[in-house]
Image (cartoon, grey):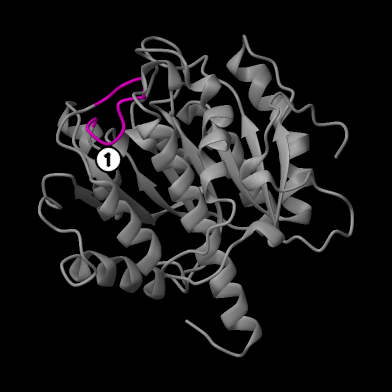
């Protein structure tokens, strides 16, 4: 992995860089790109901020899963990619993404949300089939153009479905609440997917309160035969009170409790990867946003390791 340049003096949870045969099944890499934002730039600094925030978790055992992923994880650093052209960045990302995916279950730190499209392309090639997607966001990201440009951080959902990278019926959006025309807001639902708006989730935080949402997601994945499931978590799914450090904040969002409950309760689904995007440290306060992002990534990794251990021990979904 020496070909991948590292642009931070810290790694997530202080884990080592990946080495061949190191026995660490999970990997993490940063994609420090924010050339496609529509409002405030700064997400290119997200990977470093998330890594720095993760350091408080280094000696932590997850309170729900009762384990730590530190001995199962390697951090490949920030990938060396072009930073002025979206097309060139995506093209340059293809080879290192494929190489990392061939060796490990990957988590990607963004960067803006335009990074998800090439990651889905790489994952479809890896798994040989379209993916189901669990998408946390304030925005639907289903626009057909990016303010006159063909692609950006608000078009990737539309592009992924049009390209056949995602199973439309397996696309689930959580936290949507931004302004937009009906055709864009309902794009996923109109194609057989499901949308849980932030309004619909108000006041629901515990596993019991969120049970109808969790059951609906489980039933959908079961009906589809549990396809490979990708988690794309835009930090602006959170209310700005929990995550002010993002490029396009939207009031009325989710709480950290809601996101954590969903991640913890659905950890045994067939997840094959995750990204956490749109953390913009220049607008953060007291590292609230970076801390939330680090905790979400940590929780996802703990959940995947827990599920892996259960499968090894003979457990199942």
Q: Bin the neighbour count of mark 1 within 10 Å (Cα to Cα): few under 14, some 14-19, many 20 and up.
A: many
Q: Which residues are magenta?
A: 240-249
Q: Residue at x 61, y 60 (%)?
A: 69
Residue 271 visible in image: no
Query: Quick check: 229 above or below 8?
Result: below
> Which residue is denoted by mark 1 in the rendering?
187
Give the number of marks: 1
Classify residue 51 as left or right of residue 239.
right
Give 255 or 194, whichever is nearer the viewer.
255
Q: Residue furthest bottom?
A: 314
Where residue 68 appears, as percent x and y from the top left, is: 58, 63
Give 85 or 112, whichever is nearer the viewer.
112
Where residue 91 appears, as percent x and y from the top left, is: 70, 26
Classify residue 274 as left or right of residue 144.
right
Residue 137 visible in image: yes
Q: Which quadrant would the N terminus be assigned to in this image? A: top right
157 is within the stretch colored magenta: no
- Which picture quadrant has residue 175? top left
Q: Residue at x 18, y 36 (%)?
A: 177
- Which picture quadrant has residue 108? top right
Where residue 142 appears, as percent x and y from the top left, is: 34, 33
- Which picture quadrant has residue 181? top left
Query: Quick check: 98 above or below 236?
Result: below
Q: Residue at x 45, y 12 (%)?
A: 149
Q: Residue at x 71, y 23 (%)?
A: 7
Query: Quick check: 118 above or below 122?
Result: above
Query: Quick check: 211 above or below 71?
Result: below
């Amino acid at each position: 992995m020496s070909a991948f340049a590292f642009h931070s003096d810290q790694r997530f949870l202080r884990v080592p860089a990946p080495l061949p045969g190191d026995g660490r099944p999970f990997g993490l890499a940063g994609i420090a790109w924010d050339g496609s934002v529509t409002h405030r730039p700064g997400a290119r600094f997200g990977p470093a901020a998330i890594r720095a925030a993760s350091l408080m978790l280094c000696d932590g055992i997850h309170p729900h899963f009762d384990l730590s992923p530190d001995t199962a994880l390697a951090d490949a650093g920030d990938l060396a990619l072009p930073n002025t052209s979206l097309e060139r960045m995506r093209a340059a990302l293809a080879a290192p993404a494929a190489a990392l995916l061939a060796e490990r279950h990957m988590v990607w730190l963004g960067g803006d949300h335009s990074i998800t499209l090439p990651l889905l392309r790489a994952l479809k090639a890896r798994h040989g089939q379209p993916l189901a997607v669990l998408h946390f966001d304030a925005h639907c990201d289903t626009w057909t153009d990016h303010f006159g440009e063909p692609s950006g951080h608000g078009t990737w959902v539309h592009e992924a479905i049009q390209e056949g990278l995602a199973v439309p019926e397996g696309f689930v959006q959580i936290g949507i609440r931004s302004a937009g025309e009906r055709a864009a807001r309902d794009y996923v639902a109109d194609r057989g997917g499901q949308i849980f708006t932030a309004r619909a989730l108000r006041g629901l935080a515990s596993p019991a309160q969120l049970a109808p949402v969790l059951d609906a997601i489980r039933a959908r994945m079961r009906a589809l035969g549990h396809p490979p499931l990708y988690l794309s978590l835009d930090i602006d799914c959170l209310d700005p009170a929990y995550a002010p450090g993002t490029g396009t904040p939207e009031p009325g969002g989710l709480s950290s409790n809601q996101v954590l409950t969903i991640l913890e309760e659905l950890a045994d689904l067939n997840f094959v990867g995750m990204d956490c995007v749109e953390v913009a440290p220049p607008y953060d306060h007291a590292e609230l946003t970076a801390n939330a992002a680090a905790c979400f990534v940590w929780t996802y990794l703990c959940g995947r390791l827990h599920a892996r251990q259960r499968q090894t021990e003979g457990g199942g979904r």
